[in-house]
Amino acid sequence: MTYTVYDDILTLSLVQEACLLLDVSADVFLKLFGEHFFLFCKQAGYDTMLRTLGGNLIEFIGNLDSLHSYLALSYQEMNAPSFRVEMTDDGKMLLHYYSDRKGLYHIVPGIMEAVAREFFDSKVTMVVLNQSEEDERTGKKEHVVFLVKQTKQGSKTSDQEHSSHKRETLLRKMREQCVSPAGKKHGWDLIRAVVLSEKDAAQKHSTWGEINSSSSSSLHCTFSPSYPNKLWVEEKTFCNAFPFHIVFDEDLKVRQTGVNIQKFLPGLQARDAMLDQWFTIIHPQVTFTIESIRKFINSQFVLKSYKDNHTTLKLRGQMLWMESLGCMLYMCSPKLRSLQELQDVGLHLADLAQHDVTRDLVLLNQQRLAEMELTNQLERKKEELRILSRHLEVEKQKTETLLYAMLPRHIADQLKDGKSVKAGEFEVCTILFSDVVTFTSICAACEPIHIVDMLNSMYSKFDRLTNIHGIYKVETIGDAYMVVGGVPIPTETHAHRVANFALGMRIAAREVTNPVTGKPIQIRVGLHTGPVLAGVVGEKMPRYCLFGDSVNTASRMESHGVPDHIHLSTSTYSKLKDAGFNIQERGQIEVKGKGQMTTYFLLGNPLVSEDSIMGKEVGGPCLYRDDLHSQSKKESDKVPDVKTVRGDTPSDGVFAPDPTRLASITPFAWDITPPYETNENNSEISASNFNSRLCVLF
């Protein structure tokens, strides 16, 4: 967040983590960050402002504190460092860095080198001469002295050209390694190589020549001002033209003040008034002595008056030392951020001199503060929207998970997009029905909650098996459980999958206890293979349902089955007989609505262990030819290759049923006889009486 203040502990923690990942020292990392921070400020819109700070590096550094003071209008809690340039007698440049934020001074060389290179076409190297802590007004302050060496970049030395060529060669090799599949590097390795190359380059050229007097004159302006012999300004006019100024001597005794300062603080007119009795220094954070002030003479000074009549006045301006008089001139103006502060202090725009830019600054900053507040609100809203979007995505995933549990993925996606889902005809699939033996008796003898617990335990185990064997759960009604293999995603091993699932059901059912007898429950399972018509039925609670005589036949295999046995039709047997399953012929039986049918019992699968069938074997071989894992990954993108009826014209591999053909089908026939009814009268009904292809709807 732009206007949020973050603790330096976070900054130092980020530095430590980055240094660990890059395997470099903190000083190298912070120096590179200094260069990046300068480029970031340029890209953020401060390019022109930075260029106008000074015509050379010394002037640029001397006005950094003024820039920080201006930025403090927008960022009130900004804790900026302070800079001071000192020129020694032998022409060397010393940069004094003051900050109460310890451990960050290595950023300074990176910033200064980038400034000199970008703005002044010169090369700068900085060496730490001294590092200490000074007792300032706010306590311990870090004071670092840098020796600054500056040279023109007009002509490169042979060593510099060699270093540049070597660096380009290194970068070219890194790019080649990044492109070549055989020479790929981890992302952090590449970054680390760049960082180390910067460090080597800095070490090899640390012996650059110092700036001499001739080069110094070429780098700095040689303008020579002229001064009048007499100051043509009246004392009264000066005090009116500069209503906010203070002149004080070496003992901080006030000698002269502007008219508006006298108006606001009349006590300063006293004969022996001391400046430190009325004001305290806010910036720079130094002790209120003439020596400390002269040390930071190039800094912008902010003074704050002690509370008087519940009002506080802040002054901002420049200190000028008058050697002949032994006095300091403080040319200042009120430090104001808005019209509200102007009113709170008790001033008016008329109290500010016509030439004082504070008048314009207050008005402009009033508008800027409104824009900042709007920006801050937008950032907060953006952050809230980002968090809300993340939570919404989590809830969306939960909703989709629930939806995909009710409908096939591609069907659900079509419904979400508002598209109509067309019915599809699957030429071959395997359908399974199961129920609990004596379920009616169990319901009569138990509390409803016991029935719910039993079914929940059983269905949870069955649902897990559907994921293991890659089949689709169609419906559960009471104790009836229906699944299908090969729908909605066709697969060649649909019969094998459903057969193994049936074997797993029988094993899982033995782990569920009958609440009446306390013994394991028994289930009856029936399988049939054949064509079906599949589609979505309903709008309020849409379900993916199967239609066709194959559904009815599979239900009959279950209802005419034997407890704890898996009953197969002839068509399912033909799919499994050569697949290694242990199958026993039951013989011909009378099936209601079908007449005489030859059926079979599935006893087991000697080729696969029970742990594999139950999905408990870790790292075991795949059960089916079409890999289950790759199949599950492609489910969301794969459109079922099915055939439906829409005249003779296919469209996208999915066909809608022809209305004329549906009209010729016998009206829907409902069978409401109990599933376990074996009355001979019911079984005498001929299968020819059920010509409808849509026999059972689940």
Image (spheres, rainbow, N blue to C red):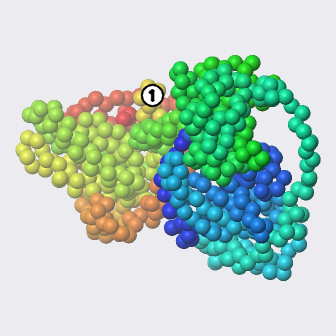
Q: Nearer the viewer, residue 26 or 522?
A: 26
Instruction: Note whether 160 is above or below 602 in the view shown.
Output: below
Label 1 CA crowd tier, 10 Å (few <14, some 14–19, many 20+) = few
Residue identifier under label 1: 538
- Which quarter of the figure has residue 31? bottom right
**Residue at left offset 73%, top offset 73%:** 171
Instruction: Note whether 353 is above or below 644 in the view shown.
Output: above
Q: Nearer the viewer, residue 383 or 104?
A: 104
**Residue at left offset 32%, top offset 51%:** 464
Q: Find residue 670 and report its horizontal and vertical position in percent.
A: 34, 29
Q: In the image, 520: left or right of 89?
A: left
Q: Find residue 123 and report its horizontal and vertical position in percent.
A: 79, 67
Q: Nearer the viewer, residue 245 or 398?
A: 245
Q: Nearer the viewer, residue 162 or 591?
A: 162
**Residue at left offset 48%, top offset 53%:** 9
Total marks drawn? 1
Query: Can residue 44 be spotted in the picture?
Result: no
Q: Find residue 217 and report its horizontal and vertical position in percent.
A: 88, 63
